[in-house]
Image (cartoon, rainbow, N blue to C red):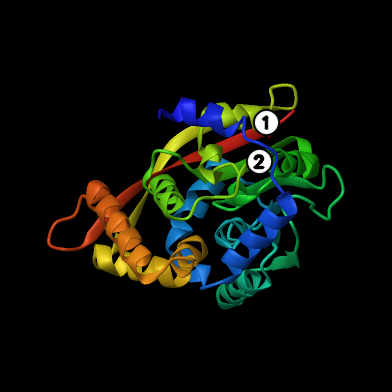
Amino acid sequence: MSTSAALADQNHQPAVDFGALKARQQNAWSSGDYAVVGTTLQIVGESLCEALDLRAGSKVLDVAAGNGNGALAAARRWCDVTATDYVPALLERARERAKADRLSITFQEADAENLPFADQSFDTVLSIFGVMFTPDQERAAGELLRVCKRGGSIGLANWTPDGFIGQVFKTIGRHVPTPAGARSPALWGSRPRLEELFPATSASVAAMPRQFVFRYKSPEHWLEVFRTFYGPVLKTFAALEPAGQDALATDLLALVARFNRADGGTMVVPSEYQEVVVTRL
């Protein structure tokens, strides 16, 4: 199925119990330790902040901040930064990093679909591989628009459906199907979906395909890290019997082999994402 066909199919799914799905996702992201993976993605935060052309003193909100890549990058540019997530343990990791770098950031537990801030509170709102995982995508996008000032910017880094991580999601979904009606988070990495979430009446969307390169000691090393620390993969393995776990591991390693550009046994895998700048009208 093509990406466009998959998008159309995803957008005509039956109703889903968002509350149950949110609880399931929160449980997944609370498992393992995403910070072990997240810290390797710091370059994405730096690139997004440059794309946003952040100015010192701007009020910046990092939504679904995880271990703080976007918040830290904004704070390095002398912005007034607030970082939110609905997983307290992840915010604690971000707080530790900010303290180590002597960066001033306000941390607040919050749900991306119900942000506890007044309308037009921030000059810039950003999210790096975060808000894309919300179950109610329209509501989350609406919240980003609501808290962003008119003329302000929303910056996003979203994995694409056809890139490596998008294909990881697709692979694990073949082994443990997602709940009926749930939309793939990778849809946030498709231009048509972005234009639906941020309609032209309220925003203008600019998106640039980028590559983040996963560099690990070996494909097996990557698999060990992701099945131990990356919540969605960890929970998928945990839901399977031993034979199913072996089959999933085989499929994931085959996927790595398809993308891997390294020789000598190491892993160098580019993963496409969309670097998005939405201007609030």
> In terms of image quadrants, where is residue 249?
bottom left
| Secondary structure state at the residue bearing disc 1 | loop
Q: Which mark is residue 151?
A: none
Q: Residues within 10 Å of mark 1 (few under 14, many from 20)?
A: many
Q: Nearer the viewer, residue 77 or 193?
A: 193
Q: Which mark is residue 198?
A: 1
Asked whether the beta carbons under mark 1 and mark 2 sit within 8 Å of each other, the answer is yes
Query: Which of the two discs, 1 and 2, sits closer to the camera?
Result: 1
What residue does disc 2 label?
154
| Secondary structure state at the residue bearing disc 2 | strand
Q: Position of residue 103 (x, y in %)?
A: 63, 69
- Which badge, 1 or 2, is on the more N-terminal residue? 2
Please tell me whether residue 9 is drawn above or below residue 267 in the rendered image.
above
Task: Tell me which residue sits at (12%, 62%) in the image.
Answer: 264
Q: Position of residue 101 (x, y in %)?
A: 56, 73
Q: Nearer the viewer, residue 54 or 5?
A: 5
Task: Tell me which residue sits at (62%, 59%) in the image.
Answer: 25
Q: Position of residue 163 (x, y in %)?
A: 38, 42
> In terms of image quadrants, where is residue 100?
bottom right
Q: Position of residue 170 (x, y in %)?
A: 43, 46
* Res 53 seen here: no
* Res 210 seen here: yes
Three-letter residue code for mark 1:
Phe
Horizontal arrangement in the rendering, residue 185 relative to residue 137 (left or right): left
Task: Tell me which residue sits at (33%, 67%) in the image.
Answer: 243
Number of numbered tags placed on the structure image: 2
Q: Nearer the viewer, residue 118 or 5?
A: 5
Three-letter residue code for mark 2:
Ile
Give the farthest residue toward the top.
201
Please tell me whether residue 17 is drawn above or below residue 242 in the rendered image.
above
